[in-house]
Amino acid sequence: MLLEVDFTSKIEDFVAFNGPKMSYTKVPLGNEFFIKSTDLLFEQGVRDVDIDISKWDNVPCFFFQGKKSTIPFDIFSASFFLITRYEEYLPHIKDKYERFPANQSLAYQHGFLEKPVIDIWAYKLLAVIKERFPEYEYKERTYKFISTIDVDNAYAYKYKSTIRAFGGLLKDIYQLNFFNALDRIAVRFNLKRDPYDTFKKIIALKKKYDVRTVFFFLIADYSTYDTNVSASKGKFRLLIKDMVDYARVGLHPSFYTMNNFQKLKTEKERLEGITNMPIFRSRQHYLRFSLPTTFQKLIDLEIHEDYSMGYASHVGFRASTCTPFYFYDLDFEIQTPLKIFPFALMDTTLNDYMKLTPKQSLGKINELNNAVKKVNGTFITLFHNESLSGYMRWKGWGRVYESMLKIITNR
């Protein structure tokens, strides 16, 4: 059973109501459940905000409001600040890929990046509400898991153009990577399976562990940062069609789509032409997005779900939550129809940035999963088909994905 809730800004209506009630204002109106408000939610636009982090019991929190407030912090304003990514609208130094860096975030600087603090605050608020209103009934939410797979390179060697294949072979020989050169030749002549072709394995694991799986396909024109097989290749198109039969499929907009509407539109239409169905999920390649511009472009193209909310360099919760939420556009001061699905970790973060071994990575995955389970949130992971290959820089990683699924499903 869910309680019906009414909102009012009329003091006389609030005072006259005899049932359970909560006020969010500067001073209490009586003996009600009172949360003292800051100014943030009553403002328009973006400004520098003074933030002083302290602890609510053992949980980091800010916007302290003192003992007169039923709870000591204005968690509504604090949650709004974090979940809208307010700090990303403020002046900051971007990284080399023009992204907001994790180390400039409040969560990283104050040590709560790996905690879904908004969800933790919500449960703490619930505990106080239940104590104050014992008759209050609420719907218990359940833990969910979503496995997402980015397909930056569907194949290591197969179906690449002759020029790219020959160029790659010369590069391997020049760098004395003779084993790679031999693999390249063997795959090209169908003597060996392409190492990145792990799609049957992923689908088999999806069925075995019964996990919701979403593939994001990069189908851009070739560039320095977009090196997938050409979308004109029949075998690549067949692969995408096959995945549609077994899992959900979304767009992986290319490196330069962050501020380029036409390129984004072209790629969406290209993928829809292959799948013969509307595409409404996406995740930006290299996690390159600029707030609110990139998300505004996705909304214009009727993308309803975005999975880009996370950092490349660090695991954790970029928006401080493990709950999907609707993007709030601070420029226009509106809640949009774009639902954000924040992921908690990425395989390349664990391997390339954090330099963790496969065993250490599974330990970190387990920590983050437990943090999400404690608040019955949604645990979203980001892997690449490449990492399941155990090939080259992914040596030793061949079984990490399945080991993760065993941990998550308790098998």
Image (cartoon, rainbow, N blue to C red):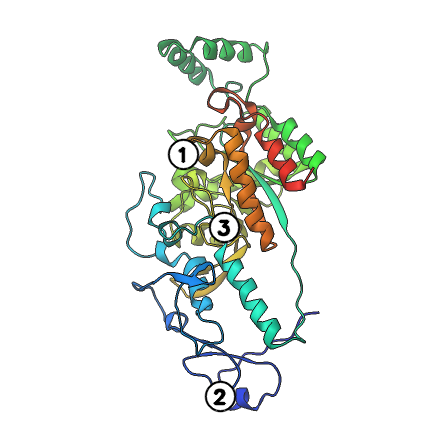
The circle on residue 388 is none
**Circle 3: element type:** loop
Residue labelled with disc 2: 11
Q: Residue at x 58, y 72 (%)?
A: 129
**Circle 1: element type:** helix
Res. 15 visible in picture: yes
Query: Looking at the image, is 102 positioned above or below residue 184?
Result: below
Q: Is residue 273 left or right of residue 320?
A: right
Q: Which amino acid is tagged 3?
A: Leu
Residue 60: give x, y in percent of width and height: 43, 58
Q: Which amino acid is tagged 2?
A: Ile
Residue 311: give x, y in percent of width and height: 43, 43
Q: Residue at x 43, y 18 (%)?
A: 164
Q: Is residue 46 left or right of residue 123?
A: left
Q: Nearer the viewer, residue 392 or 181?
A: 392
Displayed quadrant of residue 1: bottom right
Q: Are marks 3 and 2 in contact (CB under 8 Å)?
A: no
**Front of the two marks 1 and 2:** 1
Q: Which amino acid is tagged 1?
A: Tyr
Residue labelled with disc 1: 353
**Front of the two marks 3 and 2:** 2
Q: Is residue 135 left or right of residue 29?
A: right
Q: Cα distance, mark 3 to mark 1?
A: 33 Å
**Circle 2: element type:** helix
Q: Cα distance, mark 3 to mark 2?
A: 43 Å
Local packing at callout 2 (Cα closer than 10 Å; few below 14, some 14-19, many 20+) is few
Residue labelled with disc 3: 301
Displayed quadrant of residue 367: top right
Query: Looking at the image, is 384 positioned above or below residue 164?
Result: below
**First of labels 1, 2 by sequence position:** 2
Query: Looking at the image, is 97 positioned above or below residue 237?
Result: below
